[in-house]
Amino acid sequence: MRQKLIAGNWKMNGLTEPGLSLAEELAQRMHRAVELNDPEPPNCDLLLCPPFTLLAPVWSALAGSGISLGGQDCHTEISGAHTGDISAMMLKDAGCTHVILGHSERRQDHGETDAGVKAKAQAAVEAGLVPIVCVGESEGERDSGSALSVIAGQVAGSLPSLVTGEEAVLAYEPIWAIGTGKTATPEDVAEVHGAIRALIAERDGEAAASNLRILYGGSVKPENAEALMATADVDGALVGGASLKADDFWAIAASCP
Ligand code: 13P
């Protein structure tokens, strides 16, 4: 049984306040849950991915809470003349365990390609981080019936071939569902997640594929989380907007069966 992962992607949101208060509030809830069972601890792993500028204070706020820290991107090199970039080693050094890679917003805003994402994911694994590799189709691709083939191409192109199901996490985020309030139906999500797992099994063997966590992302909210988290092959969520509110993020975590 795979433990679910609920990851908050703060994107380019959060100054010291309210970012720090949000992290502190979640850390306090975890402490109360673990020590007093009030509320009950969520049945999942929790991860926060704030912007780079908040990694250090959020790391301090989360200390001892069991909530992990992640970055939102990294470079392919360990260090060097790359003004404005952050390496996987730097994220590791700042307390991160995970890094989101190939988010559709980066693919769109920065022209990131599958090959570039693959190189970053390789660098992340070498630095001891778990890459969360994002894939997902556009609305036009879904409407034209090519969603599954687009996603298969992204998985093949973005996930390093030697990376096993245990070393990486995949996130299925249909672009048309991000920040729009539209969510894929549990049936569509189950179909895509099942197809992704089958692809990984082909190259990685059934056992390793069975350990791969596949997250769903795209307008995940307290109202739809229960149905999504009960869907076959859904191993958690990558949450954008709702991760900026402690009550909503906690409610999504609490919806894990
Ligand atoms: P929303 O939850 O705001 O739709 O964002 C999803 C996302 O892109 C998470 O990476």
Image (spheres, rainbow, N blue to C red):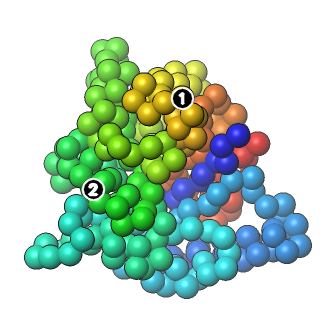
Q: Label 2 amino acid? A: Lys
Residue at x 33% of width, y 73% of height: 89
First in residue order: circle 2 vs circle 1? 2
Q: Residue pushed farthest top?
A: 145
Q: Residue pushed farthest left?
A: 81
Query: Where 10 sits versus 86, above or below?
Result: above
Residue at x 75% of width, y 57% of height: 42
Q: Give the residue number, with chain letter if any, for mark 2.
A: 120
**Horizontal placement of 246 versus 178: left or right?**
right
Q: How many marks can you see?
A: 2
Mark 2 and ligand 1: say if the CB distance to the nearest ligand atom is below 8 Å: no
Give the percent coordinates (x, y) of residue 70: 46, 66
Give the percent coordinates (x, y) of residue 253: 68, 54
Q: Label 1 amino acid? A: Glu
Question: Counting other residues with Cα less than 10 Å from the Cα at mark 1, is it few (<14), some (14-19), or many (20 or more)?
Answer: some
Q: Give the residue number, with chain letter if any, for mark 1.
A: 206
**Residue 24 visible:** no
Q: Secondary structure at mark 1?
A: helix
Query: Where 196 sits versus 96, above or below?
Result: above
**Horizontal placement of 209 versus 42: left or right?**
left
**Horizontal placement of 109 versus 250: left or right?**
left
Residue 206 lies in quadrant: top right
Residue 233 lies in quadrant: top right
**Residue 133 visible:** yes
In-front residue for pair 172/122: 122
Query: Where 83 sits versus 159, above or below?
Result: below
Residue at x 34% of width, y 14% of height: 145
